[in-house]
Amino acid sequence: MQDLTVTLVQANQIWEEKEANYRNYSNILKSIKQPTDLIILPEMFDTGFSMNIQLAETWEKNASLDYLLELAAEYNAAIYTSMMVKINDTIFNRGVFIFPTGKIETYDKRKSFNLGGEDKYYTPGNTETIVNFRDWKINLQICYDLRFPEIARNYEIVGIPKYDLLLYVANWPTTRIEHWNILLKARAIENQSYVIGVNRFGQDGHNLLYSGNSSIIDPLGKIECKLENQMIFTSTLSKLTLINTRISLPFLKDY
């Protein structure tokens, strides 16, 4: 059993400017003052939540993926975020979890944000991705997925919960930020899991405002941190807290 140190990066993304975003994240990450296991960047970290699929690169030749691999190696930490990816003629909003070793696992966003036109440009995924990292089982999610509890349902398999940490990366606007706050807590309580939501900050190319509110929620629904301005924050998740919560309140076995 080991704890997991996580770093939340709540950035003001530069609209559709990949190189500028790389420089921005590199500058922000310089303020990390302690070793960390996992660095989490907002959804579509390199472009913002854009429908300009001309910016999508292939998986085999991808500058953004190369940049993330460099970050993972430099900080000896895993990275989770999402970006647009072109596979043949299909475009995905693809979550990428990069291990410090360079190993990559992926998750394609399953719930398209139709209100924003995402369904017209991106193909939804149809499978769950749970990665095993540092003795933690981590369920990967992206933004609008948060509204659909059924795709994040935790339960026991042979007496062991399916996952321990639920990760959301997002571009979730200020107009609906209270929904974000409430749903993150709900996912933690109902799944007896840590939940982390990393949202962007600032204003996008459509003049939508984002207030961040990136958060860490413990398995009882208690907010361990909430970020309001552009910033970086590092915290350690307690595996003992997770285990003790599940022992004292053994609700997952009833699903």
Image (cartoon, helix red, strand yellow):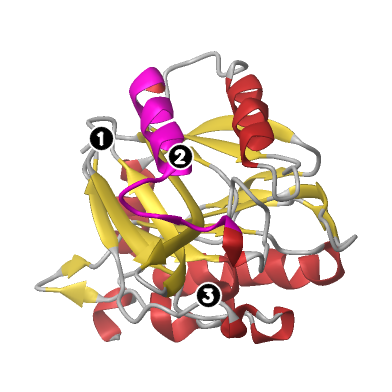
**Front in this rendered view, residue 128 or 88:** 88
Image point (59%, 65%), residue name = 53
Q: Earlier in the sequence, mark 1 or mark 3?
A: 1
Q: Which residue range is magenta in the image?
A: 55-74
Q: Is residue 59 magenta?
A: yes
Query: Most prominent secondary structure in the magenta stretch?
Result: helix
For the residues carrying marks 2 and 3, which lies nearer the camera in this image? 2
Q: In whole angstroms, how far apart are the C-alphas of marks 1 and 2?
A: 15 Å
Residue 87 in the image, given as x and y percentages of width and height: 35, 67
Q: Is residue 19 left or right of residue 211?
A: left
Front residue (pair 105, 214): 105
Q: Which amino acid, mark 3? A: Asp
User: Which residue in the structure is indicated by mark 1?
Assistant: 102
Q: Which residue is mark 3?
A: 145
Q: Are marks 1 and 3 in contact (CB under 8 Å)?
A: no
Q: Quadrant of residue 101?
A: top left
Task: Choose between 110 and 93: the one closer to the eye.
Answer: 93
Residue at horizontal 51%, vertical 55%? 83
Q: Amino acid at mark 1?
A: Gly
Tell me where residue 78 appears, x and y as whole percent. Answer: 36, 36
